[in-house]
Image (cartoon, grey):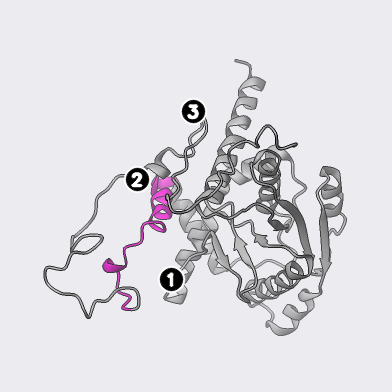
Amino acid sequence: MSKKTKQELENNKLNKRLRHAVGDAINDFNMIENGDKIMVCLSGGKDSYALLDILRQLQASAPVDFELLAVNLDQKQPGFPEHVLPEYLESIGVPYKIIEEDTYSVVKRVIEEGKTTCSLCSRLRRGVLYRVAKELGCTKIALGHHRDDILETLFLNMFYGGKLKAMPPKLVSDNGEHIVIRPLAYVKEKDLARYAELKQFPIIPCNLCGSQPNLQRQVIKEMLQDWDKRFPGRIESMFSSLQNVVPSHLADTGLFDFAGLQRGQQLKHGGDTAFDKESLPQQFSDRHSDEGGAIRVEIPPERKVINILASKPKNSGH
């Protein structure tokens, strides 16, 4: 096998893995429904580029019809290359809207020099996007957060906020008017980095607000990256734990009635044990493997969801 052929094979495997991971997340959480108009928030980073690209692939083949609208918020940071995103979106034929809102000046006025600006910047940006989604009639807001972002948020909340809380793949917005989805929830950041390089996306560096080397998120990111290198499988196991929560074995009295617990009571997840030594659940051990055909998605019988990884009906006219 030639070097070129081998590389093409690896590229195809990567594309297939990402497509299936995104499709599985969409199916598992019923993120996209027939007739949805999805606002894809495009920042110019590798994650949002990949999100838009994969959603376009699914849009072309999925048995549900939905619209995609790429939206970028130009926050008026000095030096922001305003031409990059419009040129890219026009070249691929995706409908888009650029929103100009000077949140940069607000952040610089409110936050002291040397302090972290990301939190306020994010809240201001999200508020603008919610407003725009309503104005444009979008039914879903798609964000480019991936598996590593979700785990980083989990540890940030534990270490610095005292909460067992992460980013859910799907949730209602703060104002209650929108459904926010994260189709990349099952995707590894390192796969997105490889994909961006393969696709040669015109990346806009996220350094326009100045260097902030001591961000708490960066500290957590480096910790997880170190674990991933030294302990293969640990990241997968940690993410799996977010989908296997056992309230009776934690300590939140709002989630479990510890005060009313009685001897002989049968608990859903069993009684007290020192440690559950279990193998990685099947869904994370091989569900996104490169081998085999279409990936089977387990759907509870009472919930009817169309598999977005399936093909359009032959008589659909597409």
Which residue shows up at 25% across the image and 61% down it? 268
| Mark sitting earlier along the chain (1/2) | 1
Disc number placed over residue 280 in the picture, else none: 2
Percent x, y of residue 110: 71, 84
**Is label 3 in a helix, a strand or a loop?**
loop
Which residue shows up at 86% across the image and 59% down it? 82
Disc number placed over residue 266 in the picture, else none: none
Percent x, y of residue 272: 18, 64
Percent x, y of residue 80: 82, 62
User: Disc 3 to disc 1, how far (Cα)?
Assistant: 40 Å
All told, the count of numbered labels is 3
Q: Which residues are magenta?
A: 229-253
Q: Are marks 3 and 1 in contact (CB under 8 Å)?
A: no
> Which residue sits furthest front?
315
Residue with the mark numbered 3? 292
Which residue shows up at 51% across the image and 57% down it? 222
The type of residue carrying mark 1 is Phe
The type of residue carrying mark 2 is Leu
Disc nearest the viewer among 1 and 2: 2
Q: Quadrant of the C terminus?
A: top right
Q: Quadrant of residue 260?
A: bottom left
Seen in the image, is 190 located left or right of residue 246? right
Which residue shows up at 57% across the image and 45% down it? 23
Along the line of sight, the residue nearer the viewer: 208 or 145: 145
**Is label 1 in a helix, a strand or a loop?**
helix
| Mark sitting earlier along the chain (3/2) | 2
Say if 178 sits above or below 223 in the image.
below
Residue with the mark numbered 1? 159
User: Disc 3 to disc 2, how far (Cα)?
Assistant: 20 Å
User: Disc 1 to disc 2, how far (Cα)?
Assistant: 25 Å
Seen in the image, is 224 located left or right of residue 177? left
